Amino acid sequence: MCGIVGYLGRNKASEILVEGLSKLEYRGYDSAGIAVLDEGKIDVNKCKGRLANLESKISNKTVKGSLGIGHTRWATHGEPSDVNSHPHTNEAGTIAVVHNGIIENYIELREWLISEGYNFKSQTDTEVIPHLVDYYYNGDLLDAFIKATKKLSGSYAIGIICKDEPNKLIAVRKDSPLIVGVGEEESFIASDIPAILNHTRDIYLLEDNEFVIIDNNGIKILNSDKEEIKKEIFHVTWDANSAEKGGYDHFMLKEIHEQPKAVKDTLAGRITLGEKVKLDDVKISKEELESINRVYIVACGTAYNAGVVGKSILEKTIKLPVETDIASEFRYREPIIDKNTLMIVLSQSGETADTLAAIRLAKENNARVLAITNVVGSSIAREADDVLYTWAGPEIAVASTKAYVTQIITLYIVALYIAEMKGTMTEEEINEIKEGLLGLSDKIATIFKYEDEIKAIAESNKDKEDMYYLGRGLDYAVAMEGSLKTKEISYIHSEAYAAGELKHGTIALIEEGTPVIALATQENLFEKTVSNVREVSTRGAKVLGIAMEGHDTIEKVVDNVIYIPRVSPILAPVLSVVPLQLFSYHIAKARGCDIDKPRNLAKAVTVE
Ligand code: F6R
């Protein structure tokens, strides 16, 4: 995830910025840069790769200035490269900007600025910001910056400096975190607390649409009408380690809680009510889509589980046969692939060897390949014909959570895109799903209120050796992911079963006290699932049910139930997986497991 640091004080800004950025390295990044106001001009140094590259770039320079901004970039728009790294400047190099988040309307703004005579160097969404501020600049940076931000839609935390206002650092936030550090005759901005902990523990937490102006008179926080806002100082008591995890005990838990934002970001600019789906990087034409008669979804592990959800979503919406395959199996089973095949590959890392091999096989046979990945410029992104990025931000815990959820979100987006092009759904049906999608972020957040209850249930199961997850249809697909989460982080043996299939053998394993997690969110399958749950509960299973609000008849056959908010059944997987992630996390924690780095597992599997 991108990181921002900004400084105005008495010391050498370049050193403080680089040190601050080093404290944000844990968030993941692909390039780094700083801009320092030095001897009347803004000196920008930035490059692709590790922070060490930036350090060696500036090591033989004497940048003495004490005002500057720095950034570590996690690419979203444009591959990792020197030119795409932040800070970005206006053409004259008098205004420099760092930005976290996504500017949804950057294409329109870019076109408009080009028509006004501006030239762009990078592929980023960020570069519109310094040009916009330049457009409005008339000797008052704050004024120009406020006008520029009024033109932006999307999420942002932005830090800005200007050569002509040499003792001023301005920043703003909207839907992307930003804090202000209060030091002794020095002030800071940062996207996260660890960046400034070595200098101060006193911070202001900015709210959306609040601007901070740091100058020689101190710190002022204003709204967009330039009215001053009084804020309490928040004194940080966390140590550096827990500050990195935002106060959570593990990255996995932090990432579970980041899912509302990850979902919102992934939808941003792509799904808007009353507008057609927008996909910048997907170039497949209507004619090419018309010729597709078969779809494969290919992936590994959790991404494969997202693909199983994807099969149902696509079949229901684009009315074509869809097969989901495990990448390591796919190419050895002689699949039928030709120019009328669309292959969708899912991969958080974009580097999974088996998934990459499947792409190569598909391309040798003239299929069209669409990659859904979280890493811009990864091998899978480069080899596919089209790429759609999940904007989950880097996932640090080995066990995937927010990447899974955003992969499913991206599959809905693809499904609606194809359905709109091919006319396989009515406008009303499409709008209903779009509306549902836009409401998911808030709905995920409401599930967290059950966390203590889920934790207590998890703790009561910590000594079990086997567990079963049941569901039908989309619930079965989510059960597979719940089961994988449980085994990989808690080391409890777990299996997912299609609820109706259990009685054909596996039910023999159910005995007094066997834990069963039963998903029953699908309206049309609810009664049938309840009957299957009764089959296990009457044999002694201890059942945790996951159902939609209003389906309280499930309480007759389960021991505990967690309700997810009401949503169209096709969208339920994005909600129902959340209690399963929390359940697995809390069991693993109760068992004392190394949650963020489970034994024998790696984050990117680059061997076949
Ligand atoms: C499990 C998990 C793995 C990955 C799998 C594929 O939590 O993260 O199962 O999903 O190794 O990795 P990617 O998505 O990087 O291709």
Image: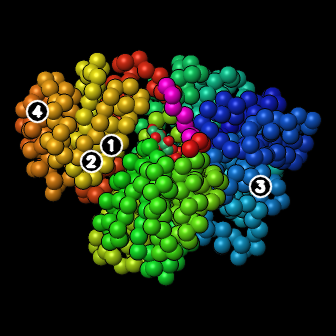
Specify whether 480 is left or right of 396: left
State which mark lies toward you, 3 or 2: 2
Residue at 28% across / 58% down in the picture? 570
The amino acid sitting under disc 2 is Tyr
Q: CA distance from mark 2 to mark 1?
A: 6 Å
Give the secondary structure at mark 1: helix
Q: Main secondary structure of the magenta part?
A: loop
Residue at 70% across / 34% down in the picture? 21
Q: Could you tell me if the residues under marks 4 and 3 are in contact, i.e. CB atoms within 8 Å?
A: no
Q: Which residue is mark 1?
A: 480
Q: Circle 2: is it few (<14), some (14-19), or many (20+) Cα within 10 Å?
A: many
The amino acid sitting under disc 4 is Ser
Q: Could you tell me if the residues under marks 4 and 1 are in contact, i.e. CB atoms within 8 Å?
A: no
Q: Which residue is mark 4?
A: 537
Which quadrant does the N terminus fall into? top right
Q: Could you tell me if the residues under marks 2 and 1 are in contact, i.e. CB atoms within 8 Å?
A: yes
Q: Circle 1: is it few (<14), some (14-19), or many (20+) Cα within 10 Å?
A: many
